[in-house]
Amino acid sequence: MVRIERLADLKPVHQRQAAVLALWRWRAPMLAFELEAEWGVDQSLLESLFRLAASPAGGQSDGAYRRAIAELCTAPLFTSEVDPDTVQLFQLESISNLLTFGELLDKPGVDEVERVVEASAGLATYLDGLVESSFYSHPAEEAHSQYLADADLADRASEGYFASRHFAVETACHGALGVLPDSAGLLDSSTGRELLALCEEFGEELVTTMQWLRMTGHWRSRREPDGKCGSRDGRVARNRGLLRAAPDEQARFGLGKNAEADQALELVPGALASVPSSRQAAK
């Protein structure tokens, strides 16, 4: 409820920027791990989606974002079944959020923004669950416990470290959005770049923990990011449903004119990629 109220208080242009910052918190973890080669996803295309999202709103950048989404949806990944490991599952969820942002371009409003922001927060909570269910102690367990002890969590006392950190970063971002120029993208102002860097710093923390999960052999939680338990077949089916396009999405992304692309919209799982020196993008 607090998150919704804060978003509703922002101007539409700043609501959009709040959604971009929510995407950016997961940019580092998505771009730090190599993609499955069989997915056939171009890493530079994924990087461009983040940059286009952070560009000034308008016909040129929005059109380029739509074209990039259309190109992404032709990748073999979108006609495949995937059984992701832990990191790949985060990649699938993040590509879903990138597509949701694409919907926001044509249907701006607080509801679409909320979907992007809530998805980002949900992934942080999911990561907390993975850490808590591990047989190994997190290398920063004491520091995380101290952070939670020092934080004023109020009615969020049950949250784990990453959910709490995500909320703190989100709060700092939303508090600063009001001073951003309405006509500028986040990459075009010093304040905007500082907010992207703040999200990037949080993302690098996520990367460290995901690397630890892989190193300790944590393949995947028994619970999905939305809290549902399921079998392998259930997970694959859910990945399809994650990114299934609305009927009018074909026209928006230019995918309604050939059968192969139409099929992709029916079988969409998802993915994100790897780019070196993720901190540089916020500069």
Image (cartoon, rainbow, N blue to C red):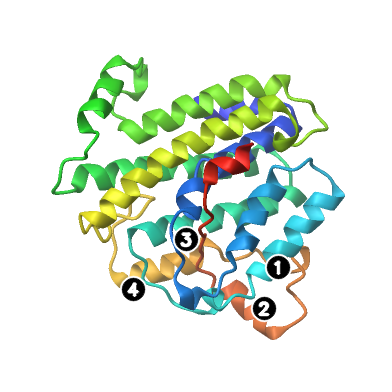
Outermost residue to the bottom: 259
Mark 4 → mark 2, Cα distance in angstroms: 24 Å
- Mark 3 to mark 4: distance in Å? 16 Å
Image point (36%, 40%), residue name = 125
Q: Position of residue 243 (x, y in %)?
A: 55, 63
Q: Position of residue 242 (x, y in %)?
A: 50, 61
List the residue tagged with mark 3: 92
Which corner quadrant of the image does residue 237 belong to?
bottom left
- Residue 73 position, x and y percent, is 63, 70
Q: CA distance from mark 3 to mark 1?
A: 17 Å
Proximity of marks 1 and 2: CB atoms separated by less than 8 Å: yes
Q: Are marks 3 and 2 in contact (CB under 8 Å)?
A: no
104 up-or-down from 5: above or below: below
Q: Is residue 10 depicted above or below 22 in this figure? A: above
Which residue corresponds to mark 1?
Answer: 70
Circle nearer the viewer, 1 or 2 = 1
Residue 111, quarter of picture: top right
Q: Which residue is mark 2?
A: 261
Kindly identify which numbered label has been placed on residue 209.
none
Which residue type does callout 3 highlight?
A: Leu
Q: Nearer the viewer, residue 40 or 121?
A: 40
Q: Of marks 4 and 2, which one's residue comes earlier in the chain?
A: 4
State the separation of the CA atoms marked 1 and 2.
Answer: 9 Å
Label 4 belongs to which residue? Answer: 233
